[in-house]
């Protein structure tokens, strides 16, 4: 048994409670069987997401005290812009309040009705920003990416043959940019290889296409390039980061994931892109030197980004995820393999194979898991899709329950508790029934829709 080893110690703690099952039953019913609507006080282990809930370091906390409050021209902004320039080699930085705000600005600037945005795989908010502007998303994930179990180390790779075929079909002028998502969220946190990033760049250069990186989950992807891709075992994370950054016309990120912080932003070396997007920062986010972020979170991000260059720091999440996923697999629980970043992805289509996709197997399983354990996971399946324009369900490629591993937050015994409860539920999986909507919002329904048992 290979145990993950914590390369940090805990110096501030938060008390948790584990409610009795009757109270958990009340809580999940009140939440409309949607784990997003649970109160955190009713949750034992919050594995909903890694977003904004990663543990900060002592250095990040202390940096927050030296934040320079100013609407315009804050020294804090200069420090953050300088750190991004140092790590990514980019001259321009547009700050934003979080990752989806960057997507909003990119879509507002570049996506017109009838446009097509190719990507390795969509993310929920990314896609909605594009479709709301009349654009269309084309997912060009390599076929291996949708295999739940494989040995392939880089299931986030984009199929460049599919990209060439798409460009030939729709024409380069209908493609405002190509988007690559590091640590591909909705298919199990799967990384992209540097070799694939280079190959995609080559196609984009050939056709004169802009290439944009969603670096929200870059941290895990950096770890996987270093540990899984041939030739990078001894390459400093800083060098891998610089090599990646040089391939893209623009990079955006959620600081709630990357850099253990909050906020987000878009960075680029392209003056035209910078100027085209710049006006939307003061319009939607805040002035150009804070973009909706507080100076304290910007200071924390400066340090958090720097700590992201430390292999001992960024290996923690993937190592815990690897441990949990392989333990579950050893107990025959269907999980996505190889384990990726972000969290453990339980394959609900095999776990509750008695439920049709129209009864939301992932949502049902997430709700049941909370009931039997107090562990809060997140539905990543058909519920997280939006209906087709004609109202029919769009069935997800994968039905997953994500058990996120916020970085440096949980201990190994807590992870073992979660493993034990997931195994129990698997042995008793016939208890899990399907769900149907009682309140179904039109936009991003998974966040706040309410459901009931069928
Ligand atoms: N891109 C990716 C790949 C993401 O995973 C997220 C957020 C965003 C963009 C949007 O960033 O939340 O700062 O606005 N993912 C979170 C999650 C919410 O739980 O998977 P944001």
Image (spheres, rainbow, N blue to C red):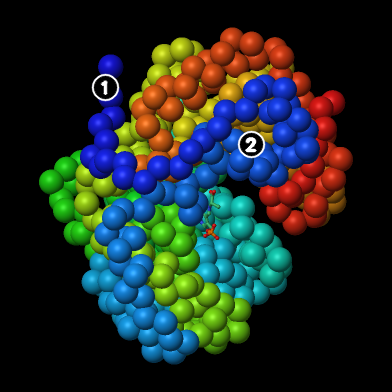
The answer to whether residue 431 is above or below residue 308 is above
Classify mark 1: helix, strand or loop.
loop
* Nearer the observer, 382 or 145: 382
Mark closest to the chain's N terminus, 2 or 1: 1
Q: Nearer the viewer, residue 357 or 18?
A: 18
Quick one: which residue is furthest to the top in this view?
427
Q: Residue at x 43, y 86 (%)?
A: 70
Viewer-side label of 2, 1: 2
> On the image, numbered disc 2 is attached to which residue?
42
List x then y, in percent, for residue 314.
29, 46
Residue 448: which numbered mark, if any? Answer: none
Looking at mark 2, is its residue's CB closer than 8 Å to ligand 1?
no
Q: Quadrant of residue 101?
A: bottom right
**Which quadrant of the figure contains the C terminus?**
top right
Asked which quadrant contains residue 84, the reply is: bottom left
Q: Residues within 10 Å of mark 1 (few under 14, many from 20)?
A: few
Which class describes the residues within 10 Å of circle 2: few (<14), some (14-19), or many (20+)? many
* Of residues 168 and 97, the one drawn nearer to the viewer in this rendering: 97
Q: Along the horizontal axis of the image, is 221 left or right of 388?
A: left
In the image, taking residue 428 as reference, residue 222 lies left or right, namely left
How many angstroms separate mark 2 from mark 1 (CA)?
Answer: 32 Å
Tell me the SS state at disc 2. Answer: helix
Confirm or deny contact between disc 2 and disc 1 (CB under 8 A): no
**Number of callouts:** 2
Q: Residue furthest bottom?
A: 72
Percent of width and height locating residue 184: 47, 47
Task: Please say if 399 is above or below 444.
Answer: above
Q: Is residue 182 visible?
A: no
**Which dot marks residue 2?**
1
Where residue 410 sits in the image (x, y, percent)?
Answer: 41, 36
Residue 107 placement (x, y as % from top left): 59, 71
Q: Residue at 16% across / 43% down in the picture?
A: 233
């Amino acid at each position: 048994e290979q145990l993950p080893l914590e390369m940090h110690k805990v110096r501030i703690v938060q008390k948790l409670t584990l409610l009795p099952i009757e109270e958990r039953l009340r809580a999940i019913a009140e939440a409309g069987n949607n784990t997003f609507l649970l109160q955190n006080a009713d949750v034992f282990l919050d594995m909903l997401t890694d977003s904004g809930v990663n543990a900060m370091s002592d250095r990040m906390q202390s940096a927050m005290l030296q934040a320079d409050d100013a609407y315009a021209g804050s020294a804090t902004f200069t420090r953050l812009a300088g750190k991004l320039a140092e790590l990514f080699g980019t001259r321009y930085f547009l700050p934003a309040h979080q990752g989806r705000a960057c997507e909003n600005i990119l879509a507002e600037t570049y996506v017109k009705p009838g446009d097509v945005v190719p990507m390795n795989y969509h993310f929920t908010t990314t896609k909605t920003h594009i479709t709301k502007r009349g654009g269309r998303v084309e997912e060009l994930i390599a076929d291996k990416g949708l295999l739940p179990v494989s040995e392939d180390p880089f299931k986030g790779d984009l199929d460049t043959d599919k990209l060439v075929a798409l460009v030939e079909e729709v024409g380069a002028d209908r493609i405002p940019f190509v988007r690559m998502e590091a640590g591909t969220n909705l298919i199990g946190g799967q990384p992209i290889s540097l070799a694939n990033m280079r190959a995609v760049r080559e196609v984009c250069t050939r056709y004169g296409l802009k290439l944009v990186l969603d670096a929200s989950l870059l941290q895990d992807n950096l770890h996987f390039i270093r540990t899984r891709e041939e030739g990078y075992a001894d390459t400093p994370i800083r060098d891998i980061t610089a090599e990646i950054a040089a391939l893209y016309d623009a990079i955006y990120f959620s600081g709630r994931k990357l850099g253990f912080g909050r906020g987000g932003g878009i960075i680029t070396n392209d003056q035209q892109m910078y100027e085209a997007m710049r006006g939307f920062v003061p319009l939607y986010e805040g002035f150009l030197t804070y973009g909706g972020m507080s100076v304290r979170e910007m200071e924390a991000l400066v340090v958090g980004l720097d700590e992201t260059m430390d292999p001992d720091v960024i290996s923690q999440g993937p190592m815990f995820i690897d441990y949990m996923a392989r333990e579950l697999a050893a107990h025959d629980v269907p999980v996505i393999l190889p384990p990726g970043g972000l969290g453990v992805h339980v394959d609900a289509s095999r776990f509750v194979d008695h439920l049709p996709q129209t009864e939301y197997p992932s949502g049902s399983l997430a709700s049941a898991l909370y009931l039997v354990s107090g562990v809060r996971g997140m539905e990543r399946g058909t519920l997280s899709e939006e209906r087709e324009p004609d109202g029919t369900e769009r069935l997800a490629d994968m039905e997953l329950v994500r058990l996120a591993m916020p970085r440096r937050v949980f201990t190994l015994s807590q992870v073992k508790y979660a493993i034990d409860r997931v195994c129990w539920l698997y042995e008793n999986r016939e208890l899990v029934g399907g769900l149907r909507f009682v309140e179904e919002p039109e936009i991003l329904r998974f966040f706040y829709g309410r459901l009931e048992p069928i």
